[in-house]
Amino acid sequence: MPTILLVEDELSLALIVKDNLESRGFTVLHAADGQAGLDLFRQHDPDLLVVDVMMPVLDGFSLAEQVRHAHATVPIIFLTARGQTADVVRGFELGGSDYVRKPFSIEELVARINARLLAVATPTPPALVAIGQYQFDYPHQRLLRQGHAQTLTNREAEVLQHLYQQRNQVLARAEVLQALWGDNTFFNGRSLDVYITRLRRYLRADAQVQIVNVRGIGYKLML
C-alpha cells in the first residue's frame, strides 16, 4: 500500500488522521515539524505528502519548495486552516497538488489522497506534444519555444493538459474543477481563472493558439 508522509504539529489531530489512514491500509509516517518532515521524506521517499502550513522550524510552504527541488511529481496536499486566496495560490505555485481546509472530514481527505495517487499512477503521455509553435512537456511541467523554456507550476501543467486533451473542443469548467480540485465551488473557480489567465500569457507569442471562454460552459483550446 502507498506510504503517506503526514507533517502536522497538532498531535491530537495527527494521531486521528494517522489512525484513520492506517485503518484504510495506508502506511503513515508522521513528523511534528517541517524539518523533521523533510528528513523523513529524504529517508523514505513516500508516495504522497499531507502537509500543514503553519509549523515550527520549517513551515509547510518551505517544506514543499524543498521537496519539489528533489521530486517533481510526488503529490503534496496542504492541510491547513489558512484559506486566503493568496495562500492557496502560493501553495499551488510551489507545486502543491491539492488544498484541504480545516476542519475537514477524513472521508474528504481520503478521497483527495486517492485521487492524487490515481493521477500519478495514470500512464504518462508522450513527453512532448505540439501546441502551435510550442512544445508542451507535461511530465516536466514546461512550455518550450525557440530555445526558451517556461516552467509551469503543477496546477498550471494539469490545467493545460486537460485543455490539450480536448483541444478544439469545449472543455466544461465543472469538469476541470472536479478533476483537479474535487469540487465545483466559487473559490476554486476563481483559482482556475487565475491559471487560465497565466496560460494565455505564456502562449501569447503564437497568435494561432487561443484559450477562449465559452459562455456558460467552459473553455476551448484552439490550435
Image: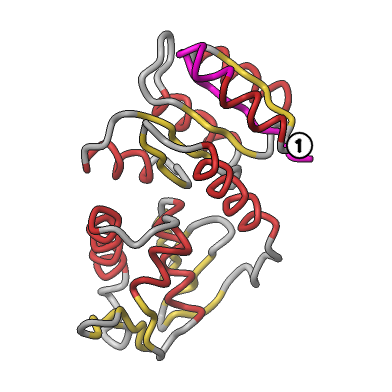
- Which corner quadrant holds the C terminus? bottom left
Q: Which residues are magenta?
A: 1-15
Residue 46 sits above or below residue 107 on the image: above
Q: Residue at x 50, y 45 (%)?
A: 108
Q: In the displayed structure, does residue 126 sit left or right of residue 96?
A: right
Q: Quadrant of residue 5?
A: top right
In this view, the residue in front, 168 or 11, is 11
Q: Quadrant of residue 36?
A: top right
Instruction: Where is residue 38? Give x, y as percent.
Output: 57, 20
Instruction: Where is residue 207? Give x, y as percent.
Output: 26, 84
Instruction: Where is residue 116? Give x, y as percent.
Output: 58, 51
**Disc 1 target residue:** 25
Instruction: Where is residue 217? Give x, y as percent.
Output: 28, 82
Question: Does the magenta-highlighted stretch encompass residue 19?
Answer: no
Residue 29 sits above or below residue 35 on the image: below
Q: In the displayed structure, does residue 45 sit left or right of residue 220?
A: right
Residue 161 sits above or below residue 130 on the image: above
In this view, the residue in front, 104 or 148, is 104
Q: Residue at x 39, y 81 (%)?
A: 171
- Which corner quadrant holds the N terminus? top right
Q: In the displayed structure, does residue 16 sit left or right of residue 47?
A: left
Residue 31 sits above or below residue 105 on the image: above
- For label 1, the crowd category at 10 Å Cα-Cα, with few meaning under 14, some 14 to 19 and many 20 or more, is few
In this view, the residue in front, 50 or 42, is 50
Q: Residue at x 60, y 39 (%)?
A: 71
Q: Quadrant of residue 194?
A: bottom left
